[in-house]
C-alpha cells in the first residue's frame, strides 16, 4: 500500500516525471514511524525539504525487512533508499544523490565490559581475540569490516539482527560481546530500552551518506534536478537547520 506523502510544489527545476517510491523504515532518529504511524526523523525531513524544493512528489510504502527492501529496490519496485553509502558495486544498478549527512558506525559493549575491549583497534583484534560480534543483517560498515567479515563468519564470531531492539537484547543476553551499527541509532534505541551502552574508541566508519536511486526507474536527469534543489537548500541553510535539530553532522 502506498501513501502520497508529498505534493508537487513550486520550484526552480522541472518536477520529477512521477511520484518516487520509498518504504517506511525503523531507523531512528533518521526515519521511523511516530505514534500515529507518520514518518518522522532527520532523513525524512531532509528528503521532504529537497522534494518540495524540486517540485517532486514522494510515495511512502509500508515497512519491509531490510533485505527485502534492498531486493525490491534492485528489482525496480522501490525508487529510493536513504542513508546509503556510495560503493562501486551499487553504482552498477543505482544513481547516488549529493551527500546530505555523515554516518558514524561504532562498536559498543556493556559498560561493565568496556575495560576488556577498550583497546580493540580493528576487526583483526576481534578475530584474533575471538570476540563475538553482533551486527545488522545488511549494510555497509566500512572497508575494515568488509575485509574481515568472511573470516569472522567462518570463525562463527558474527551474528546478525534485523531490528536494533533485537540486537540490543541479544547484547544484554550475552549473545555477543560487541554490537556494531549507526552510533546515533544505537544510543537512541538503548535510551528507549533504558539500557546503558559504552562506545569503544575505534569507529569502523565515518563517511557521508546519500539518497540511492534505482537506475531502472529514475532518470539521471531527475537525480540532477533533486541534486540542484539540495544545493539551493544547502546554500540557504535550510538543511543545516534540520540537521542541527537532530544533532546530525555533515
Image (cartoon, rainbow, N blue to C red):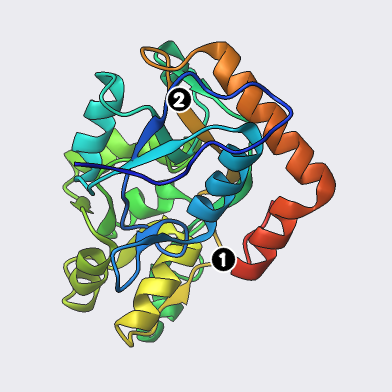
Give the residue displayed 19% in from the left and 45% down from the top: 65
Q: Nearer the viewer, residue 131 or 158?
A: 158
Q: Residues within 10 Å of mark 1 (few under 14, many from 20)?
A: some
Q: Which residue is mark 1?
A: 201
The image position of residue 232, as x and y in percent, is 78, 37
| Cα gap from disc 1 to disc 2, whole angstroms | 34 Å
Tag shown at residue 213: 2
- How many tags in the picture? 2
The image position of residue 134, as x and y in percent, is 27, 58
Image position of 62 (left or right of 14): left
Give the residue displayed 34% in from the left and 69% down from the top: 34
The answer to whether residue 247 is visible is: yes
Give the residue displayed 63% in from the left and 32% down from the top: 54
The image position of residue 49, as x and y in percent, is 61, 47
The image position of residue 228, as x and y in percent, is 71, 28
State whether residue 246 is above or below residue 223: below
Q: Provide the secondary structure element on which disc 2 rests.
A: strand
Give the residue displayed 33% in from the left and 88% down from the top: 194
**Could you tell which of marks 1 and 2 lies nearer the N-terminus?**
1
The answer to whether residue 203 is visible is: no
Q: Quadrant of residue 187?
A: bottom left
Name, please, the residue furthest toward the right: 235
State whether residue 139 is above or below residue 204: above
Q: Are marks 1 and 2 in contact (CB under 8 Å)?
A: no
Q: Nearer the viewer, residue 229 or 216?
A: 229
Q: Residues within 10 Å of mark 2 (few under 14, many from 20)?
A: many
Tag shown at residue 113: none
Image position of 204 (left or right of 20): right
Image position of 129 (left or right of 84): left
Image position of 177 (left or right of 65): right
Q: Nearer the viewer, residue 119 or 100?
A: 100
Amino acid at each position: 500500500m502506498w501513501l502520497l506523502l508529498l505534493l508537487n510544489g513550486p520550484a526552480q527545476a522541472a518536477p520529477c516525471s512521477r511520484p518516487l517510491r520509498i518504504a517506511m523504515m525503523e531507523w531512528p532518529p533518521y526515519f521511523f514511524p511516530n505514534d500515529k504511524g507518520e514518518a518522522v526523523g532527520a532523513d525524512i525531513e531532509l528528503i521532504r525539504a529537497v522534494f518540495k524544493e524540486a517540485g517532486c512528489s514522494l510515495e511512502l510504502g509500508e515497512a519491509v525487512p531490510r533485505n527485502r527492501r534492498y531486493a525490491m529496490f534492485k528489482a525496480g519496485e522501490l525508487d529510493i533508499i536513504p542513508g546509503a553509502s556510495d560503493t562501486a558495486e551499487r553504482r552498477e544498478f543505482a544513481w547516488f544523490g549529493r551527500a546530505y549527512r555523515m554516518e558514524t558506525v561504532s562498536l559498543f559493549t556493556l559498560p561493565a565490559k568496556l575495560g576488556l575491549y577498550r583497546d580493540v583497534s580493528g576487526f583483526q583484534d576481534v578475530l584474533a581475540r575471538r570476540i563475538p560480534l553482533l551486527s545488522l543483517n545488511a549494510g555497509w560498515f566500512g572497508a575494515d569490516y568488509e575485509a574481515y567479515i568472511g573470516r569472522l563468519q567462518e570463525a562463527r564470531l558474527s551474528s546478525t539482527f534485523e531490528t536494533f531492539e533485537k540486537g540490543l537484547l541479544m547484547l544484554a543476553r550475552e549473545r555477543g560481546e560487541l554490537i556494531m551499527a549507526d552510533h546515533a541509532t544505537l544510543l537512541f534505541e538503548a535510551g528507549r530500552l533504558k539500557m546503558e551502552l559504552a562506545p569503544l574508541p575505534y569507529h569502523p566508519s565515518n563517511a557521508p551518506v546519500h539518497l540511492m536511486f534505482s537506475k531502472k526507474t529514475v532518470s539521471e536527469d531527475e537525480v540532477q534536478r533533486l541534486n540542484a534543489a539540495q544545493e539551493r537548500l544547502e546554500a540557504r541553510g535550510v538543511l543545516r537547520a534540520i540537521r542541527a535539530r537532530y544533532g546530525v553532522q555533515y
